[in-house]
Structure formats: C-alpha cells, structure tokens
Amino acid sequence: MGESVAEATIIKWVKNEGDAVKADEPIIEIATDKVDSEVPAPEDGTLIKCLVKDGDVVQVGQPIAIIQTGAAEATVAAAPAAAPVVVEEKMPDIPLVPSPTAPAAAIVSGDRFYSPLVKNMAKAEGISQAELDSVPGSGQGGRVTKEDLKNYIANRGKVSVAPTAAAPVAPAATPAADAPAPVKEAPKAKPALSVNGNDEIVQMDRMRKLIADHMVMSKQTSPHVTSYVEADLTNVVTWREKVKKHFEQKEKTKLTFTPIFIEAVAKAIKDFPGVNASVDGDKIILRGDINIGMATALPSGNLIVPVIKNADQLNLVGIAKKVNDLAERARANKLSPDDIQGGTYTLTNVGSFGNVMGTPIINQPQVAILAVGAIRKKPAVIETPAGDFIGIRHMMFLSHSYDHRIVDGALGGMFVRRVADYLENWDVNRDI
C-alpha cells in the first residue's frame, strides 16, 4: 500500500469462504485515508478462511485471508470435519479459530498490538494503559478489537475483569489487586449537544475520520515550524497571461499556476535536498527521487494528495499535463493507489480559496510542505540602478512548514527563499 500508508479499513469481501479464486482476481475491497482499492488473489486456489471482518481496521502487512493452493485443496475436501489446514508457508503460526477455553493472557503494552482506533477509544473513555492491557482480546494473537473494547466499556464498573490466565492466579498477581483502588465506573462520554434547534450534528464519513487521525498523528510526530516569504510574481503573471491561450491550443491542456510552482519547488529541492527526506528513528533518509504531491480538494470537501513522480525530470508541459490529469481523476474518484504513493514533498495552494497564507501540516512521513497563497496586486518598493520607486506588483506569500527534528530554521528558511527566487526571476521571454 505504500510507505505512507500504515493501515486500511475492510470495506467488504468480494469472495466468501469456500469460493475458488483465480490469480489477480479481486477478493476484497479496502479503503485507506486516500483511496479505495481492491486486493487481488496472489494465485489460484480456494479461499478457506477470512481472518478479518467488514469494518475492521488492519495494519499493512497483517494477514487478512488464507488461500489453499494446488494439491492442498484435496486435503481439505477429504476432511471437512477437521480444523482447516494451514498450507501457506508464509504464515504457519496463524491460529484459524480462537481457543474457546483459554482466553489470551493480558500482555503488556510493549508486546501487545493496539490499533489507533482502539487507542483513541481508550483515551476518550479515560482507560489507562495498565487497564487496557487487562482487557481480554478476541482478535488475532489476543488483539483487542473495537468490539472487545466496546463490550468492556459497557460493563466497566459493573463486573470485575475476569482473570485472563488459564490457571487460577493468586489474588496478589491480578491486575485488580495491583491497582491502587477498585475500578470505578467511567464517566459517560459527553454527547454532542445541540445549542439550539437550528444546529445539525453530522457524522464524519470514513475518509474524514482517517484524515483527522492522520493530521493528529503528524502533529504528534513532528515539531512543526513555519517560515514565510513574500515573493513578487509579476514576471510569472505577465508571462502566463501572454502564453496561456497559445499553450492550450498547442498542448490541449490548460496552463495554471500550479505547474509553475511545482517546477520552482523541484529546482529548489535539488539545491537543498535536506527537505526531501524522511525520519526513521535516529536515521535520516534522503530521498533520491523528487516526487511532489499536490493537495487537491474534492467535491465532498475532503482532501487527497496525488503525486507527480520525478517532477524534476519533466519540463513545464509535462508537469502541466500531469497536474491536470491527476486533478481531474481525483475529483472523479478515479485515482489508483499508485497515484497517491511515493510522495517526498507536498505543495498545497491555499490561494485557490482566496487565502493569503496558511500553516500547512506535514504529510507524514515527509518532513516539509509548502503552502502558496493568493496572488494579489500590492504597492511595492522596486529597486533600480536609477533609484527606488513605488509600483503595483503581483505579490504572493509562501508558507513553509517543516519538521524541526531534522530541518532547522536555516535550511527551512533558505529553501523557501530559493523557491521565491526562482519565481521572481522568471524569464518573461521564455518559450513554451
């Protein structure tokens, strides 16, 4: 699913247990925070076990199904009463059916997986990490699912948590005995209150929930710093007005400001490659490719970031065609997973909504993002060899947010200044 995608939501199973599947035939539909897609069968066989249910949030790399291939199908058909046989060598230790007699023991958080959804639910209910560790899980490997936590919350304070070890445990070793006080009934979550009868409560759709989680994660991951530069875009505006009709007639596509901005960003990244990076623990990964994502607003009000791969290797015509193609397919919900993967830097145009500037949030796992504001006519001081004078110029603010873990003010500030320099020094006589 790409390095920036950590989890996906199961929409629905296309195939059912027992169905025959063909290689590359879709077996399940999934959704990430950016795009819906289908997962194909890796090879011919029979789907003998679905390990996840519709609506589950699963981590990238987590097994979701077991497919029996080749001669192994005959083994299952000959012994239908026996437990399903795991033939897939890649996952020999996956339990197919949870043990009904031996609930999984409570595992410390350092060894136990919790999905972001479960963590957020626990936080909202005031459940401590120690208490969460004591909740029995029915998921894979004893994982606590959303339903497990909902059931626990519903009965919290009414009944004590059952011991999770198969054998009797001394009272001193139970989670309840280690707690400083008996578990009290959690306060009920505050409902969404309407101030008056004219208010409307709207449930977030799936994409908005995932975007919200991604934005919160980014702010928690990266210490954000923002630098600002005001650039004189008079040359850019003058040149575009002069060539845009001829450009559209010749290339069969419109020339917007976005390709011009992307070209300037790609040039500046080559000058300052430190902003084209990611963080892996205490290691810095300097990206070899310059893949620029462009934040695109959808008709639904949500946001998606298609990626222009190897932007530094495209001329302005190539960038313009790619920008227009991705924007059109994004609004028509026709982007493929590959269209939104692999971004190394992001550009967002807040000026398209009439905003002068913004403080954009970094698109993880990247370390920087640039927002360009509205281009406005303003009086400005113009310096000439004959002296300074006041003139009407087309001005624009650039806002550069960056991850202060690895990008300091000098690098972050010099980068955005270099982008502005490329725009200000635009050749008004440039050929298409």
Image (cartoon, grey):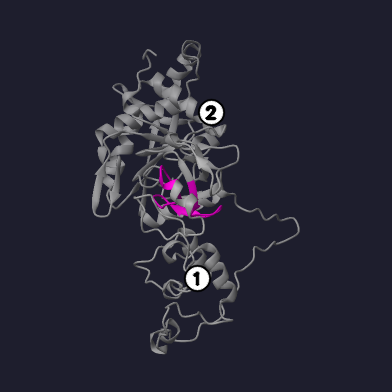
- Label placed on residue 100: 1
Q: Position of residue 105 (x, y in %)?
A: 41, 74
Q: Position of residue 174 (x, y in %)?
A: 42, 83
Q: Position of residue 430 (x, y in %)?
A: 36, 15
Which image quarter holds the C terminus?
top left
Q: Is residue 186 above or below residue 36?
A: below
Mark closer to the observer (2, 1)? 1
Count residues near mark 2 (Cα–Cα under 10 Å), then give few for <14, some for 14-19, many for 20+. Answer: some
Q: Which residue is mark 2?
A: 328
Question: Are the residues flagged by discs 2 and 1 in contact, CB closer than 8 Å?
Answer: no
Q: Earlier in the sequence, mark 2 or mark 1?
A: 1
Q: Nearer the viewer, residue 333 or 348?
A: 333
Q: Identify the secondary structure beneath mark 1.
A: loop
The magenta region covers 47-73
Task: Say whether residue 67 is visible.
Answer: no
Q: Nearer the viewer, residue 63 or 193?
A: 63
Q: Residue furthest bottom?
A: 171
